[in-house]
Image: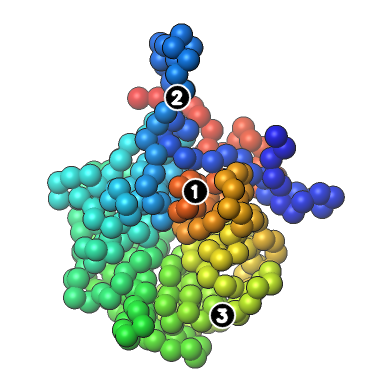
């Protein structure tokens, strides 16, 4: 089967569908003995799948996916060829993990919508700490941390009857709340049902302003800079924007649940390319309920689909398949 490329021929491709992550079997390296047993018995290979994936973040070939149904974070380590789960028990037990992000040291920050707290783990899933007062949140959903791991920005989606449509800023080390960004409204700098956020290459905060069908840019101190987007059905517009990410060139990637794709914008908010398609039949680059989105160090793009319970990975056409962090290294296998 010919795999999708974007844009489609005869245009020069810029992104290629590379792979899907559906279960642990997609990353774990099977032993020779296990392969032989399956060959003898005719059994199909199985793995641990996802229940209702939502958020995603990536660090050096390790893909973290929150699962609101299974109440855990799945860790797919493609480079090491292994899979494990985070937040299953103990002081770091999760209830409804949603937004995820990771700092340059590999510490994982999880926004738990039921606990109404941020739970922090190291790269291997060891619980470190938690912070945030539940009474200060309405419906926390998205989360991003600055690259140095100094500040954590938590998106509080709010609701129809709530005025708490905003971003709360915390000191990542102490957990103390530093400030609140924005309030409910439709004017520049105001938010309505915000969904997710990310930090751009310029250090500014980009927030998916879902109820206003736009992306807004703020300084780290919370001052409004600019916005782009409007409601509509055409490319470059938004219907149900959700996940967001940025690449090393400052381009902005926004997942749209209704469109079944993600759209790439330049730093000025101009559309560069839509990727993916809405479809009720599963397949490469086909989505029914996209949610979280992440861009890794090599420019690969990862998008979660809740309906098909998968993560699709797209590789920049300029990057050879054998290069970057998403390549299995047998020397790293535990």
Residue shown at the point (47%, 40%) measured from the top left: 22
Q: Is residue 123 above or below residue 274?
A: above
Position of residue 145 in the picture relative to residue 208 (left or right): left
Which residue, given by chain and number where applicable, does mark 1 sit on? 308
Q: CA distance from mark 1 to mark 2?
A: 19 Å
Please report contact status of discs 3 and 2: CB closer than 8 Å, yes or no. Answer: no
Which quarter shows the N terminus? top right
Indicate the position of residue 323 as horizontal and vertical percent values.
60, 36
Which residue, given by chain and number where applicable, does mark 3 sit on? 227
In which image quadrant can residue 148 be found? bottom left
Considering the numbered disc 3 on the image, is that residue within a helix, a strand or a loop? strand
Which quarter shows the C terminus? top left
Q: CA distance from mark 3 to mark 1?
A: 32 Å
Neighbor class of circle 2 (other Cα within 10 Å; few <14, some 14-19, many 20+) is few
Indicate the position of residue 176 as horizontal and vertical percent values.
21, 70
Residue shown at the point (61%, 54%) measured from the top left: 279
Neighbor class of circle 3 (other Cα within 10 Å; few <14, some 14-19, many 20+) is some
Indicate the position of residue 191 as horizontal and vertical percent values.
44, 82
Q: CA distance from mark 3 to mark 2?
A: 47 Å
Q: Is residue 102 above or below residue 199?
A: above
Which residue, given by chain and number where applicable, does mark 2 sit on? 45
């Amino acid at each position: 089967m010919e795999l999708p490329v974007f844009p489609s021929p005869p245009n020069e491709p810029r992104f290629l569908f590379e792979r899907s992550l559906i279960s642990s079997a997609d990353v774990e390296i099977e032993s020779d003995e296990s392969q032989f047993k399956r060959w003898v018995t005719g059994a199909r290979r199985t793995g641990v799948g996802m229940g209702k994936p939502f958020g995603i973040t990536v660090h050096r070939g390790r893909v973290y996916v929150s699962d609101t149904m299974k109440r855990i974070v799945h860790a797919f380590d493609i480079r090491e060829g292994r899979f494990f789960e985070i937040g299953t028990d103990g002081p770091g037990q999760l209830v409804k993990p949603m937004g995820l992000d990771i700092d340059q040291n590999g510490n994982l920050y999880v926004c738990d919508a039921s606990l109404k707290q941020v739970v922090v783990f190291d790269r291997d899933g060891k619980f470190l700490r938690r912070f945030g007062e539940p009474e200060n949140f309405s419906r926390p959903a998205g989360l991003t941390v600055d690259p140095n791991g100094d500040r954590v920005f938590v998106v509080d989606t709010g609701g129809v009857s709530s005025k708490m449509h905003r971003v709360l800023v915390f000191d990542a080390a102490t957990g103390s709340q530093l400030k609140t960004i924005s309030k409910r409204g439709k004017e520049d700098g105001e938010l309505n049902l915000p969904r997710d956020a990310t930090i751009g290459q310029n250090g500014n905060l980009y927030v998916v302003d879902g109820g206003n069908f736009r992306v807004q840019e703020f300084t780290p101190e919370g001052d409004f800079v600019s916005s782009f987007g409007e409601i509509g059905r055409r490319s470059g517009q938004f219907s149900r924007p959700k996940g967001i990410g940025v690449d090393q060139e400052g381009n902005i990637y926004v997942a749209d649940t209704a469109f079944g794709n993600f759209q790439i914008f330049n730093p000025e908010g101009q559309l560069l390319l839509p990727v993916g398609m809405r479809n009720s039949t599963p397949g490469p680059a086909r989505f029914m309920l996209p949610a979280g989105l992440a861009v890794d160090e090599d420019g690969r793009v990862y998008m979660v689909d809740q309906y098909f319970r998968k993560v699709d990975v797209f590789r920049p056409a300029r990057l050879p398949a054998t290069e970057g962090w998403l390549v299995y290294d047998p020397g790293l296998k535990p």
